[in-house]
């Protein structure tokens, strides 16, 4: 049976306000997505968690926010102008475009035997042509070749070109790192699978500058650290694995590279890479800019161009991993008191990542319950992102929050006016306990850390 999980996830994402297609009312823009009210919170929680662990919790890493637009020579130095290309073929009949290595193509593109995977015609596929993945635009009023600049296809180059600025202003010493979260753009030929491969996306990258010879050790260190971080998002262990780049896959400058892969509903795929890049990046920028980027090690009085160990993650892809891993369908008891089971969709997000931490419900809209519920809601929202809902049966309200991944449901009921306690319902176990309303803040604080 075909796996429908992605379809269901895309539909849930839209229904609950996680992710919408860009410019949807105009028919959408291919492989560009917008994050709705819940999606922006989820992605922000992931980015903040990354920033905390990579920048705030480490003495040896500094943060940076470089501009998207950079000097065009950056992309010559980085190799993107010459090398950031994919071979492409077009079908002259149906006008569709494919990667030349698309496994759906039968035969050799450019030859009469080649068959278009979309329209099925033979001999209509062009020979492969190189296609640069960088988006181009013009700087200034004149649209001429000299004014061409690129939208950055990765955040890393903003770090390399600021290496010296950060080193000098922060008084760090090698080994040290620079971390950045920001948008990147790639005119991908075969985007797809929801936010897995998009044309505009966000990266969370960290470049760690080390003394040549110590790179192997630091590479292993960062591999272990990054896997720990990913596991700490609550991702199921059996859905994670390492993939080491073979000789054919390694970028020409890379000494070693590993991807962390997740088993998505559409198969195992990378969502973060850890790369040992040698001294390629700083050496190239030194050569192209004419500025010295070597480092004086004052303890040994020697100069060297630092090697770089990079950790490169996609914020959108990591968000997709978190969503896919949290998505469950389960048979549970009816929560409106009927003696029957029903199917529920629930996002079992780690509470710290959940967009909404708790939802507050008056059991019924009478007997003073809405007033008390509002007071509880107003009190909680000073500290947490909470949600108020008084529409529909309590069971229906719980189900809506299950789909949003909200870990706690707080219900103000008949007993509240007698003993000032409320019901707290756990998203995963459906168990309900009574908590004094005055103790709710402490209770949630305790549940939401760890
Ligand atoms: P792929 O082979 O999947 O295109 P890549 O090897 O080119 O990825 P890198 O250049 O190493 O990816 O980028 C690092 C990370 O940035 C990836 O692991 C991924 O999480 C994210 N990323 C790269 N391209 C995209 C994209 N088009 N859409 C969303 N995320 C992306």
Image: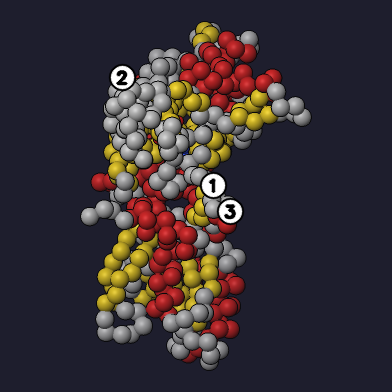
Rendered view: 123 above or below 213: below
> How would you rate the neighbour count of disc 2 (Cα within 10 Å): few for under 14, some for 14-19, many for 20 or more?
few
From the viewer's perspective, is residue 380 above or below residue 161? below
Mark 2 vs 3, N-terminal side? 3
**CA neighbours of label 3 inside 10 A, class few (<14), some (14 to 19), many (20+):** few
| Location of residue 213 by image quarter | top left
Mark 2 sits on what residue? 247
**Comparing labels 2 and 3, the label whose residue is closer to the camera:** 3
Distance between mark 2 and mark 3 Cα atoms: 44 Å
If the image is split into quadrants, where does the N terminus sit?
A: bottom left
Label 3 secondary element: helix
Image quarter hosting the C terminus:
bottom left
Numbered tag placed on residue 96 in the rendering: none
SS assignment at label 1: loop
* Residue under label 3: 26
Which of discs 1 and 2 lies nearer the camera? The answer is: 1
User: Cβ(mark 2) to ligand 1 < 8 Å?
Assistant: no
- Label 3 CB sits under 8 Å from any ligand 1 atom: no
The residue at the far left in this view is 1
Q: Residue at left 44%, top 88%? A: 415
Quadrant of the image occupied by residue 99: top left
Is any part of residue 438 visible from this angle? no
Q: Are marks 2 and 3 in contact (CB under 8 Å)?
A: no
Q: Which mark is residue 29?
A: 1
| Chain-order first, disc 1 or disc 2 | 1
Q: Tell me the quarter of the picture where residue 259 sits.
A: top left
Image position, residue 4 (x, y; %): 31, 56
């Amino acid at each position: 049976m075909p796996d429908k999980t992605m379809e269901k996830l895309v539909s849930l994402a839209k229904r609950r306000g996680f992710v919408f297609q860009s410019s949807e009312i105009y028919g959408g823009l291919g492989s560009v997505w917008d994050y709705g009210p819940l999606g922006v919170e989820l992605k922000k929680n992931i980015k903040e968690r990354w920033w905390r662990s990579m920048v705030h919790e480490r003495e040896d890493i500094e943060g940076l926010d470089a501009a998207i637009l950079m000097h065009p020579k950056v992309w010559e130095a980085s190799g993107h102008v010459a090398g950031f290309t994919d071979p492409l073929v077009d079908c002259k009949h149906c006008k569709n475009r494919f990667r030349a290595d698309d496994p759906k193509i039968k035969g050799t593109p450019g030859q009469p035997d080649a068959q278009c995977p979309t329209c099925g015609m033979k001999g209509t596929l062009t020979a492969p042509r190189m296609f640069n993945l960088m988006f181009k635009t013009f700087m200034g009023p004149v649209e001429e070749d000299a004014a061409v600049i690129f939208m950055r296809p990765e955040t890393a180059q903003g770090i390399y070109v600021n290496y010296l600025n950060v080193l000098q202003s922060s008084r760090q010493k090698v080994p040290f790192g620079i971390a950045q979260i920001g948008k990147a753009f790639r005119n991908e030929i075969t985007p797809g699978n929801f936010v897995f491969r998009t044309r505009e996306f966000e990266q969370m990258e960290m470049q760690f500058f080390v003394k040549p010879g110590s790179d192997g050790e630091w590479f292993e260190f960062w591999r272990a650290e990054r896997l720990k971080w990913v596991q700490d998002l609550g991702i199921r262990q059996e859905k994670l694995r390492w993939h080491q780049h073979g000789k054919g896959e390694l970028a020409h400058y890379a000494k070693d590279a590993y991807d962390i892969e997740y088993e998505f509903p559409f198969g195992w795929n990378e969502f973060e890479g850890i790369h040992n890049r040698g001294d390629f990046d700083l050496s190239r920028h030194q050569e192209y800019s004419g500025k010295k980027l070597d480092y004086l090690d004052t303890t040994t009085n020697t100069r060297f161009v630092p090697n770089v160990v990079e950790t490169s993650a996609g914020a959108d892809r990591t968000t997709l991993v978190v969503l896919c891993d949290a998505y469950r369908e389960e048979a549970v008891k009816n929560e409106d008191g009927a003696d029957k089971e029903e199917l529920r969709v629930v996002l079992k997000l780690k509470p710290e990542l959940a967009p909404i931490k708790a939802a507050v419900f008056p059991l019924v809209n009478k007997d003073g319950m809405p007033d008390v519920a509002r007071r509880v809601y107003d009190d909680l929202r000073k500290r947490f992102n909470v949600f108020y809902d008084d529409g529909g049966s309590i069971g229906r309200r719980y189900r809506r929050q299950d789909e949003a991944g909200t870990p706690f449901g707080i219900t103000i009921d008949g007993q509240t006016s007698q003993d000032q306690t409320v019901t707290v319902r756990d998203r995963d176990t459906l168990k309900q306990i009574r908590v004094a309303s005055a103790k709710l803040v402490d209770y949630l604080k305790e549940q939401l850390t760890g």
